[in-house]
Image (tube, rainbow, N blue to C red):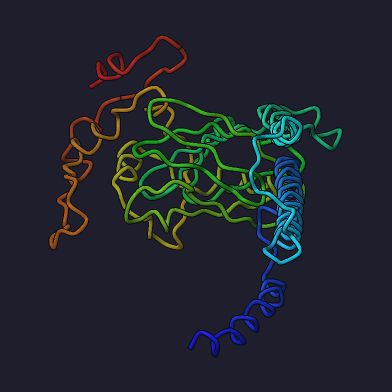
Amino acid sequence: MLKKLKPLSLLLFLALPLMLAGCSTPEVLDPKGPVASQQSDLIILSIIFMLTIVAVVFVLLTIILVKYRERKDHDKYSPELHGSMLLETIWTIIPIIIVVILAVPTVRTIYSLEEAPQPKTAEAANEDPLVVHATSINWKWVFTYPDEDIETVNYLHIPIHRPVEFKLTSADSMAALWIPSLGGQKYNMAGMQTTLYLQADHVGTYDGRNANFTGEGFNEQRFKVYADEEADYQQWVEDVQNSAPELTQYTYDNLLIPGVYNEGDGTAEFNGTHLQWIDHSKDANYTLEAWDRLGYEPKNPHAKDKSQNILTEDEIPYYQQDNTVDYSDENMDSEEHASHE
């Protein structure tokens, strides 16, 4: 039986390169910005270097297998070796060299990515990075533009050739924002803030997603990134400011209820931002408080009855008062925020 399978196995092995050649280039190896380019170069360097090591090892293995195979004319060969200082020194130094060669470009790239990319145009060089707060909610993304005073759900626009400073946090589960075409992922965690710098150098639409498993709706926690020319980006901002509905605290609190956002085309935009009521990087308990206000009760995802009786805005006195919070004081903690209730 095994003999009959050998020709088929050989055929599949030979056909594998042809099948792989028909696959499209992975997004991480098709960078559309300087951050992704640095990471792509590092990945390619590592792959080439490691494949070289594998090739050398297999060549040496083949030579040893052939040269020292059992045969009649090897009566002078004795396998009794008591160690070789030269060989042991060589195979100790070689791994150290390999680690150094891989570590130097890796460390340099990691440190360089902690700073905003250098703008490629004079116009962009005169501007600060675009600040966007990216908040993960099970299972949706909220993008906040504090300077433009607008907010979007499951999509965002950015200008090309201008660095974007993503301020990452989470309203509940730990997630990870990842836009493969623009750069690697970084974690979103409640009660703290991480920073991720990205930049697009080509007009286009790019896919983004959550790269950290967060439960049943994880696969649907995706978003679109629209990279525009500066003029088109400014026009989009103006359109949202002029036509989007005002964001209320009740509307935002409803977004905090776990679930995939299915209204309309799965996206939304608002005038105003949730930062006037809550900064999740400074208050990790707000979502639980919002659930309690709305009457939401977490249920087993396998429960037959998943219905919820969410209270209306008029039924909740909390929303009839001014709950604006000033987060300018760095010493403010969640207890101070609770005092507004």
Q: Residue at x 68, y 80 (%)?
A: 15
Say whether residue 97 is left or right of residue 190. Answer: right
Quadrant of the rendered image containing residue 121: top right
Q: Position of residue 130 (x, y in %)?
A: 65, 33
Say whether residue 295 is left or right of residue 144. Answer: left
User: Image quadrant for the C terminus?
Assistant: top left
Residue 18 vertical placement versus 232 (above, below) = below
Choose between 119 and 211: the one closer to the eye: 211
Say whether residue 208 is left or right of residue 291. Answer: right
Residue 96 vertical placement versus 8 (above, below) = above
Say whether residue 144 is left or right of residue 103. Answer: left
Choose between 50 and 95: the one closer to the eye: 95
Q: Position of residue 54 (x, y in %)?
A: 70, 53
Q: Position of residue 153 (x, y in %)?
A: 46, 48
Quadrant of the rendered image containing residue 34: top right
The residue positioned farthest toward the right in the image shown: 122
Give the mark count: 0
Residue 4 vertical placement versus 155 (above, below) = below
Quadrant of the rendered image containing residue 324: top left
Say if residue 36 shows up in the picture.
yes
Q: Residue at x 54, y 31 (%)?
A: 167
Q: Position of residue 304 (x, y in %)?
A: 13, 63
Choose between 306 and 86: the one closer to the eye: 86
Say if residue 203 shows up in the picture.
no
